[in-house]
Amino acid sequence: MGKNLWDNEKYMEDVAYVAGLPIEWDKLKDTSFLISGASGNIGSFLIDVLMSKKNENIKVFALGRDEAKAAKRFEAYWDDDRFTFVAGDINKGVELPEGAPKQIDYVIHAASNTHPKAYATDPIGTVTTNIIGTDNMLKCAAAHDCRRFLFLSSVEVYGENRGDVEYFDEKYCGYIDCNTMRAGYPESKRAGEALCQAYISACDMDVVIPRLSRTYGPTLLASDTKAISQFIHKGVAGEDIVLKSEGTQNYSYSYVADAISGILYCLLRGEKGEAYNIADPGSDITLKDLSAIIAEYAGKKVVFELPDAVEAAGYSKATKALLDAKKLRALGWSAAYDMKKGLTRTVDILREQNAQ
């Protein structure tokens, strides 16, 4: 069993990079955060960053369903007065523990099914977390005088490229066949965004919506079945990379440290009610080229294999989904990791973890 990520020097360099960003950290001094999806790819990295900012005295309420899993992941903070784990299913409501402050300054809704197998095996949970769960998080935020709410949305809200643009800006809206099981994820993310706008209108809530590109890094869960995750796990294991298509799909990706830095720029500099793409041209790549980078780094080859029925049912039909992030860059954000740097760093960190 590997040691915890916060014992990994390279990983903590990534955390320190984000924690050292030239942004308005003073706004976060003596504040509190409620973060759903705490043990996930995004939530766990963000919590590591916030907990590393000891001088800011940030209190984190980490919401998740699996206390045992969280206790292992956040062992370093478990007994810290600044950290509180809140066990619960956001689809059933969100209740903070007794003694929680009346005001929770920032609420970040990062809980969601985010990979093909989960879409196919838990289609109802995929939809409800993005709609009912979002509503419950918004209600909790309103009840606790939240300063700003962040709903983490997705590139998938843009649907399929209609062939009329090279890059999706925040106003683009492509095709989604809503009468399919796979539509549950993008349609519920769209509905979640609309629900945020309803709370802005009806409750004067301050909401900002980061739209994440396909995000990867050492915080990826072992259960994640996205193509890039499978490639990374194979590379870490020193096995051939299995490509389950021709690999011509062309997507925007983000290394997790860049995704978190983008989220923080949205939090501290984004405008109320606006959506912001988080992506960088240095991480736009086809699946075929992506698999080749990992195969070359691992000293292996790419092999082709058909997906099984469950995986295939959860795959996106989009063949080109590149994000235009000019709007976020206008806030001062820039990416620090291109595709090759992010991929090789992820493999290195996970190899070190597995060697323990």
Image (cartoon, helix red, strand yellow):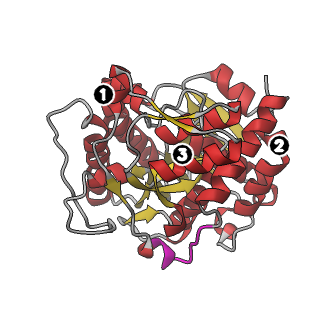
Secondary structure of the residue carrying numbered label 3 = helix
Q: In which quadrant is the C terminus drawn?
A: top right
Foreground mark, 3 or 2?
3
**Tag 2: amino acid:** Asn
Say left or right for 168 vs 69.
Answer: left
The residue pinned by badge 1 equals 313
Instruction: Answer with the quarter of the image where residue 167 lies.
Output: bottom left
Disc 2 secondary structure class: loop
Q: Residue 136, located in which quarter of the rendered image?
A: top left
Q: Quadrant of the N terminus?
A: top right
Q: Position of residue 343 (x, y in %)?
A: 64, 50
Quarter residue 220 falls in: top right
Q: Position of residue 313 (x, y in %)?
A: 30, 28
Q: Disc 3 and disc 2: Cα gap in Å?
A: 25 Å
Q: How far from the left and from the top, in percent, is residue 63?
A: 56, 34
- Magenta highlight on residue 135: no
* Dot label at residue 8: 2
Residue 9 percent across, percent down from the top left? 85, 48
Q: Label 3 amino acid?
A: Ser
Q: Nearer the viewer, mark 3 or mark 1?
A: 3
